[in-house]
Image (cartoon, grey):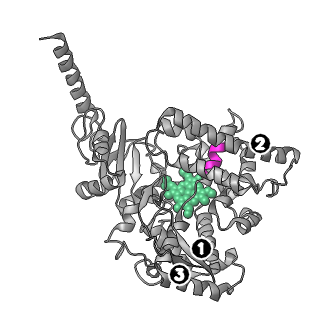
Amino acid sequence: MEFLDLSIIVLALIFLCLWWRYWPTTGGGPKNLSPGPPGWPLVGNLIQIILQRQHFIFIVRGLRKRYGPIFSMQMGQRTMVIVTDSRLIHEALVQRGPTFASRPPDSPIRLVFSVGKRAINSAEYGPLWRTLRKNFVTEVITPTRVKQCGWIRKWAIENHMNILICLCFGAKISEQRIKEIESILKDVMLITSPQLPDFLSALRKKQLECLVPLIKARRAFVEKGENPNQEMVSPLGAAYIDSLFRLEPDKTRGPLGEEEYVTLCSEVISAATTVEWAMLHLVMNQDIQDKLYHEIVECVGKNGDIKEEDVENMAYLESVVKETFRRHPSSHFLLSHAAIKDTELGGYRIPAGVHVEFYTAWITEDPDIWSDPGEFRPDRFLRGDGVGVDVTGTRLVKMLPFGAGRRICPAWNLGVLHIKLSLAKMVQAFKWLPVLDSPLDMTETYAFTVVMKNPLKAVILPR
Ligand code: HEM
């Protein structure tokens, strides 16, 4: 036998042993993981997924049918457990919240942007996460702060992104600069597939170049009262970044650095895309738009100023927003969770640190939970299968646009308020109609959030 033949046989044997050792559904790897598709040596299911040339979400839908409410996949070195059943999701996130409240290790790509898992969303469950999250909640979304930042909403209600940028930096910056930040952050959110390191470094550099000057300007305002272009409008202490300047999450390493400020502010700015989906349905369903318009007029009049407390009294608006979250959840999965220690779920073992993915979009598509789940029917929240549904999933999980339990979106109230105000103002001021030769397009594309493949086009007429 030639040396080459011998080497190939030895290599094949090593591969086989590794496969047997590490592939959980075939061999001696971690026992009693949930079932899943058998993979190839070392790479697991990764190559099979690439070869299928389908978006991951369609593959997951197929696997759910085949393997049931909880199944595993092996993506190279990464073990993923996918949970799709509303009762199991409730058990993990609410009933046994602390156990599933951590995040798995980041991929090298994500580590660049999370500066070593130091953003709220990526931090492991522990003291750093607790300090950052507590600071965010007390500094950005308390009623006092929401009131102090009322000028931002008034000025920029038609543009969600403006609001969030100003909340972070306390500054009223030009439309062009906002567009620049928006486009860079969109690129950051689109990193769901492996990219060349050069591209990532260039993108991170652009992100830093764009946001660091805002941070420096705010610091000069906070420390020396400098405000050359009168850009700084929020009073001292009222911008999210002001609180980060003071924060020392870890006594041994001192205050956070500029890179960390950029990452922490970026996670706040990268909020959702719900308004565009809601508008699409309002353009497609003129009767729903009319009903909403009548509610707004009844509440504040044709030209009345819509204030934050007004939208809280608009029950139909609330139903439209909830139905939009149900029909178009911003993401199909929550962010990846991880168990803090080896545990079990649904009778299967969940080793600590594996990626636990909650496929929450399935819950809102499940015909056992919702009647005609594909239809856009806000009325279901007034009389029907949506009455009394709790979007935080505390009592029961029927929809989870913000997650549930320890890692629930800390700004979910603020997000809903912005969406309600934007929609109410847009519908009060204009009638939105379809463009005649441009059919409405519901195709979704998958960035970090589910966005419209082709942006909404509509004709708007002043009311
Ligand atoms: C309507 C808009 C929004 C939606 C649908 C949304 C949804 C979500 C979801 C699904 C998660 C992950 C929950 C989990 O992993 O279990 C999350 C986390 C988070 N969201 Fe939101 N979000 C919205 C708006 C916002 C806004 C406006 C901010 C900031 C001002 C924000 C800040 C965060 C942060 C910091 C986390 C990480 C929480 C943690 O890991 O402890 N979100 N959000």
Q: Which image quarter holds the C terminus?
A: bottom right
Badge 1 density bin: few <14, some 14–19, many ≥20, Cα 10 Å: many
Asked if the residues shown at circle 3 and circle 2 are in contact, with their CB atoms under 8 angstroms apart, the answer is no
Q: Position of residue 89 (x, y in %)?
A: 40, 59
Residue under the image location 11 percent in, 11 percent down: 1
Hey, which residue is sitting farthest left in the picture? 1
At a point 36% along the width and 35% down the height, the residue shown is 77
Q: Based on the picture, tell me whether residue 262 belongs to the magenta stretch.
A: yes
Check the image and report above or below for 402 versus 74. Answer: below
Residue 11 appears in the picture as rendered: yes
Question: Which of these two is toward me, 212 or 129?
Answer: 212
Does residue 451 appear left or right of residue 427 in this picture? left
Q: Report how far apart the C-alphas of labels 3 and 2 lie in the structure.
A: 44 Å
Specify the segment rendered in magenta: 261-267
Residue highlighted by disc 1: 423
Q: CA distance from mark 2 to mark 1?
A: 34 Å
Q: Residue 287: x percent and y percent? A: 49, 85
Asked if residue 29 lies left or right of residue 99, the reply is left
Of the residues under marks 2 and 1, which one precedes in the sequence? 2
Q: Which numbered circle lies on residue 289?
A: 3
Prevalent SS, magenta region: helix
| Residue corresponding to mark 2 | 216
- Determine the image quadrant of residue 172: bottom right
The answer to which of marks 3 and 1 sits earlier in the sequence is 3
Q: Closest to the observer: 14 or 428?
A: 428
Q: What's under tag 2, amino acid-wise?
A: Lys
Marks 3,1: beta carbons within 8 A? no
